[in-house]
Amino acid sequence: MPNSPTSSERSSLPSIAAAVVRALTPRAEREEVLSELTVEFRERVACDGSASARLWIWRQCAQSVPHLVRRSVWRGTTGFEPQSSRMNPGGPALEQWIMDGRHAFRRLTRRPRYALLSILTLALGIGGTSAVFGIARGVLFDPLPYKNAEGVALFWQQYSWTQKEFAFFRGAFPGFSSVAQYTDYDATLELGDAPAQLVPGISASSELFAVLGAQAAMGRTFNATDDVRGAAAVAVISHSLWVELGGDPSVLGRRIQLGGKPTTIVGVMPKGFWFPAPTTRVWIPEQLDPTEQNGKFTLVGRLASGNTIDRMAAPLAQLTAALGKNFQYTPQFDKSKNAWVKSVRESFVGPLRPTLYATFAAMAMILLIACANVAALMLGQVEGRSSELAVRSALGATQGRISMQLLSEALLLGGLAGAVGGVIAAISFRWLIAALALGEWGNNAVLDWRVFAIAMFAAIVCSVVISLAPTFSLWRGRLRDVIGSSRTGGVRGRGIRLESALVVVEVALAVLVTAGAGLLVRSVDKLYAINPGLETKGVGVLSVVLPSDLSDVRRAQVTGQLIDAVRVLPGVKNAATVQMLPLRASAWNAGIVVEGKPDLPGSTTLVRLVSDGYLETMGIALRQGRLLSAADMMYDFADSSGGVVVINESLAKKYFPGENPLGRRVNSGFSRKFARIVGVVGDAAEGELRGPMAPVRYAPLVEAPFVNSTQHIVFKVKGDLRPSALLASARAAVHATQPRVAIQEGTTMDQVLARSVGPARQLLTIVALLTALALFLGAIGIYGVMSHFVARRQRDWGIRIALGLRPVRVLSGVVGRGTRLVAVGVVCGLVAFVLLAHLMRSLVYEIQTTDPLAIGASIIVLLLVGVAAAMIPALRASRTDPAIVLREQ
């Protein structure tokens, strides 16, 4: 049988209990406590037996552990205990961190200018970068709210597909498992006696939600019978609209007045779902007509299993061949050519990528400049403390201990900069969205807590990286040797080189920002130099949506009432309406036939449907004949005699070269009837500012066989009034005249022109601000380095001035050193800019990405900033008093 335990073994403390006591008891008390517990344990073993003694010791541990843990945590976090009572030799790590943090805080409070400058510099870079990341994350990187979104794609020629084409292929599109069609449906929502509000939405075929792989949070989506002609009007609403309607599940089955029609709500989509834009709030089924040939639809499909966009060449060829065989197309609308399929993300946000990437790159450069700047400031401060740190090293402080103190100061700076940077990110977030003109994407962007977390994380990472520079410099300079050379500047040689390298990096990055800003300025200047052919100053725009239940005749009457209501407002000179706003959307493209020219090849021109006064309001110049009048708006479309039309110069040159077009007749574009040309006006830009002017016909609004529900009321203000000041009055006049009319947008033609300029204009304000910030940070860096250089050589300046060196020589020497640093940085920056300039090709217009004027201006500005920043410490050095300096030394 096994050996029985001896008496000494029975009287020893249980090993686990002894380990617990040993771990939680201070080192100085540990042996004494264990000895007393052992004596007591032996006595209890002798009197009560081993089992009773073991129960006693475990009861003591259970009662003592909470108290010992609280005591240990308090000691570790405060450090308030003698060295002999500490748990581990040298004290717990947390205690050292707390002490280092306190020391770092005291040092920062003693140098408030350095602390504030470092914190603000780093916070500006971190806050701006975090705000841009918050925008880019939501627009470019967040997952789309569709099942397997990479398999959902849009077809070519959006908003041009007809119901007849869709019906021909329905259920059998080559390469797709399912396809749906949709078009815009911005409807009016009427709730009680309140003015009608606009609800952005789309109308689509019943396959839409199946293609997207989306399910309703409540109720249902579309079923197969919803898009059949004559089916009851139903709608699926967004989560936000459901909340606006009361957030009650009983909303299912509720009938609302949508677009002037009683509509039943059958489903509510989950929070966060959107298609095709974040602003979409309602989806209704489009009742299909297989004979309809009005091209206004977009096709969205889910790729067949095992298929990808890269493998769509063969299915697209099959599809285009079928289109060309079964449908007759004019050259301008031939869908059998130039076929493409894009993912939904690329189709929706692709145009925003250049703007967001350029902004993020500029902000990243600012962050790098800020980091280099703070590193240079910290290096100067640390080298100013070189004697102090050398004494600490001589007294026994280890390299790791001194480095930890410097790291603690950097982490404190980083933490404070992260907090301030989070505030800056919140402030700049909305401003950036407005400046970038993200439209419907920006309206739904939200700054969440992750951006603040990113700001804090970036600040801590930057501070740790920054702290490596001065630490590396100190130990490369052999800190213990500083005591013997303190009168000549300690480790100044390596420190000066590192500081100079940081300034060169700052200047090189500033070159990239300023040269990029110069390219944008030149490009925007070129774009604004284009004559749009119409007047944008003093012209306001009010986009309205009419109820869809109105007839074409009634819509024309309501539109006339709205024009009259705006026209009589104080300060309004004239008002008119147009179905499609120039510089934002091209007009209708319709075929043209010229009477008396039967051999003219078939072609199309743009047709812009306008009311009387439109050409005068928009400032489109009259060249011949007359403009459209109020009498022309009384034309009866049923009259076979035809109406009138005004053409632009491009149309006159193309179809009537060397002839007088007045009195000639062309078909209206909407039927076989002919309209008489009564005037010729100057060319005006259509859908975009760039490109050649297109032939355009201006036809009276009443000549159209249909009147769009969306109309744009344009009005010209008197004198120096700003149209933006009258937008509120115009809104009130519209609602007072027709409460059922919803207002889509109020803007000015100046803003429309600015948006048409494109990404370069959107970026200009941001990059201009970032350029000023880069120059400011660069100036601080140059000033800081030159100040440290002057301070370290103050004794040398005093001796040289005492020996006869003129102050102007000191001044020129310091300024020359600063200028040389800037020159080296400029050269490095120019090399980098030439290598990277091609990335800006999509943002410039009619200039080279290596435009010498833009680059030359950036060089001159940086040299001036560098000289100015070096001048202040240079003046201080030139005024050095030798007697004071030598006495101090």
Image (spheres, rainbow, N blue to C red):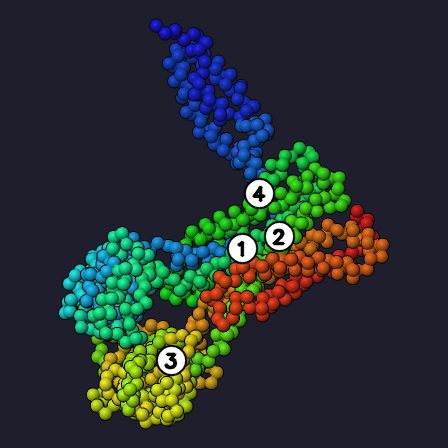
The image quarter containing residue 563 is bottom left
The residue located at (46%, 80%) in the rendering is 531
Front tag of 2 and 3: 3
- Residue underneath mark 4: 408
User: Sequence order check: which comes first, mark 4 or mark 1?
Assistant: 1
Tag of residue 367: 1
Percent coordinates x, y for residue 303 in the rendering: 27, 56
User: Cα distance, mark 2 to mark 3?
Assistant: 54 Å
**For residue 29, which quarter of the picture?**
top right
Q: Quick one: SS at disc 3?
A: loop
Is residue 733 something one can see in this rendering?
no
Percent across and percent down for residue 845 are 48, 71
Which residue is labeled 2 in the image?
502
Q: Nearer the viewer, mark 4 or mark 1?
A: 1
**Of the two numbered discs 3 and 1 in the rendering, the one whose residue sits closer to the viewer:** 3
- Specify whether 730 is left or right of 640: right
Spatial CA distance of label 3 from label 1 is: 46 Å
Lower position in the chain sequence, tag 4 or tag 3: 4
Residue 466 placement (x, y as % from top left): 58, 47
Q: Residues within 10 Å of mark 3 (few under 14, many from 20)?
A: some
Question: Answer yes or no: do the residues labelled 2 and 3 have beta carbons within 8 Å?
Answer: no
Q: Is residue 228 above or below residue 34?
A: below
Q: Amino acid at mark 1?
A: Leu
Which callout, 2 or 1, points at the residue further toward the start of the chain?
1
Q: Position of residue 570 (x, y in %)?
A: 40, 84
Residues under labels 2 and 1: Cα distance? 14 Å
